[in-house]
Image (cartoon, helix red, strand yellow):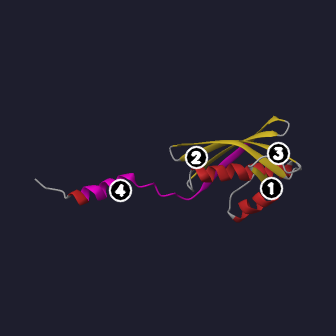
Amino acid sequence: MMRVAPITLLALAACDMAEPVAGPVQYRGISTSLLDGDLVRFDVTMTGGSGPEGARAYAECAAAQYALIRGYGFARHLRTNVKEEGGVWTADAVYTISPSLPRGLQTIDAEVVVANCAENGIPTV
């Protein structure tokens, strides 16, 4: 009977707990829904990348570009729900868009965010 040293068992256990390596990012699409006036929902789908943070960034890029398309310069983040299933990340996010800087802590300047998205290779609407 072969004996395995305790150190070897610990090393093997650590391999099982390791985080999966992020693969290449594939942005699979954005859908927008105007909920009410300036309230907009964005649904995004992607694989690879940085997981939940990548999905949140993708949704923010969509919101920023949408605000610009509508002639607004700003957006305010209300909520984002992210989930992963079978390696596919989805996020649904809700933002308000406005022509002037809205009140609140989670506001974005649409032009600045869209420029950052372009620099980072994240598509927009």
Q: Give the CA distance from mark 1 to mark 2.
A: 25 Å
Distance from label 3 to label 2 (Cα)? 25 Å
Point 30% across, 59% down: residue = 11
Instruction: Tell me the distance, in whole angstroms, between the alpha carbons under discs 1 and 3.
Output: 10 Å
Q: Which residues are magenta?
A: 8-31
* Residue 49 painted magenta: no
Give the numbered dot on residue 15.
4
Amino acid type assigned to the residue bearing label 1 in the image: Asp
Residue at 78% x, 40% y is 40
Residue 109 — which label?
1
The reply to whether discs 4 and 1 touch (Cβ–Cβ < 8 Å) is no
User: Please, what secondary structure does the residue beneath circle 2 have?
Assistant: strand
Which of the marked residues, 1 or 2, is nearer the chain's N terminus?
2
Mark 1 surroundings: few (<14), some (14-19) or many (≥20) residues within 10 A = some
Q: Badge 2: few (under 14), some or many (20 or more) residues near its Cα, within 10 Å? A: many
Q: Which residue is mark 2?
A: 89
Label 2 and label 4: CA atoms lie apart by 24 Å
| Residue 30 colored in magenta in the image | yes
Give amino acid for label 4.
Answer: Cys
Q: Which residue is mark 3?
A: 97
Q: CA distance from mark 3 to mark 4?
A: 45 Å
The amino acid on which the numbered mark 3 sits, given as a three-letter code, is: Ile
The mark tally for this picture is 4
